[in-house]
Image: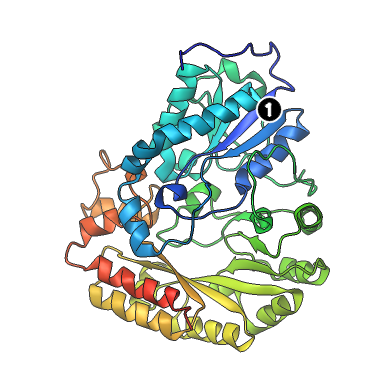
Amino acid sequence: MSGQVPYSRKESILSNKVLLINPPFARLAGLEQDYVPMALWHISTLLKQQGFDPYIKNLNIKSGLHYVGYLERTQKYSNLMSLYDMYKSDFYEELNDAIKQIKPDIIGFTVLTPQIKIVNDLTRYIKFNYNIPIFCGGAGATLNYFKINNCNLIYLGGVSHLKDIDSIENYTSTIIADQFTFGNYKGNLNLDGILDKYSPDGYGHVFSSVGCYANCRFCASPAIWHRKVYFKPIDSFLIELKLIADKFNPNKFQIWDENFTASTHRLKLFCERYDLGIPWMCDSRIVSLNENKIKLMKQSGCMQIAVGAESGCQRILDYLNKGVNTETIKHTFDLLNKYEMKSKAYMIIGFPEETETEILESIEFIKSCNPTSIVLSLFTPYTHTLLYNECVDKGLINAETYDESDHSHQSGTFMKQIHPEIHIENIIKLIDDYNFKGGK
């Protein structure tokens, strides 16, 4: 590219085209994530309501991707930027094609923490070659906004309005702290402007709330959502699901709320009113589940519940402030198996004071609960979390030089630094072996 603007932009920003981009991440590990970026789908809806013409480009998908085991993910994510550099020309080409096709007047990015350097490279490229104003948001932007470059506007937390984008050209790295709400959302999800093709189930990924009440010491959610949960009205959420069902006919819905079962009343309303006949899946906290809820969800068409066990060691559960004991974890999985509900157990290993013996015992306990599969994370401290502060106090992190965008919760790079004595690859293989054998 020559650095010259390839087309004339309109004098008025209002009613102009906005290209929303999901940058590469899982794709770099060869991992399939065949679904519409959910946050961008909602930003697209909000933009359309305000008179813009929005489009979504997903640089995180590609044909031929597949399920990748945790050992392979660890090996690839630890070299994230080198992988990005290796395939950079592919991303530039796809980005150029989208820009030439849409001719956007504004570009927006969603940013996860490990994507910060990638986004900075893509935005630099856009600024040099097209000089198009850019905004961004997402967890990475919220927690590390000071590391984001080349953006006119940076939104912290969720976005409930985009009025500032009307005059985006007047801003330079301006921080917008929005007061998030779903109050005006009527379920009218914008189904137009998606530039990529997905399987029918790729459109079935949805969320009905954001945020979590809990205060787990490893989690960045409290720093983003301040221990609040923002709910879509149930009627609006059901309208959204019906729109997707009518247009795309997915075989299942995946509800990605941090804790879909948080409100007993709301869960009951959903289960009573959901009548699409399409199976659905969700995430839950252990303490939010009981037999009555599982039975109700099963009757409503729920086919899988993923729960945050995190550990099978009581000392570590207490250390993490999980507010649950191993007996309750085992009882919950027993109930899920009793009602023939598929299950996933979220698990984290490698905390600062965790021993290899405790990790192995924890894995054996989780396996004894017979979940359908285990979702593994390797401890990575995120800024503004309680465990990050502990790592600083213990001298495990130099707050002035630590760059969390160099790590991923599946890269294992931080765990290897603080636990060189642990045979991480052998431990991860235990999880892969369990999952590849089909769990129970």
291 sits left or right of 329 in the view: right
Closer to the camera in the image, 93 or 270: 93
Residue lying farthest to the left in this orientation: 421
Q: Which percent across, then down, holds residue 302?
A: 69, 73
Examine the rendered structure and indicate whether residue 156 appears above or below residue 219.
above
Image quadrant assignment for residue 313: bottom left
Q: Residue at x 43, y 53 (%)?
A: 30
Examine the rendered structure and indicate whether residue 249 appears above or below residue 3.
below
Closer to the camera in the image, 313 or 149: 149
326 sits left or right of 407 in the view: right
Q: Which residue is mark 1?
A: 163
Image quadrant assignment for residue 403: top left
The reply to whether residue 313 is in sight is no
- Colour basis: rainbow
Secondary element type, mark 1 = helix
411 sits left or right of 68 in the view: left
The reply to whether residue 94 is in sight is yes
Which residue type does callout 1 highlight? Answer: Lys
Q: Residue at x 70, y 22 (%)?
A: 16
Examine the rendered structure and indicate whether residue 133 appears above or below residue 50.
above
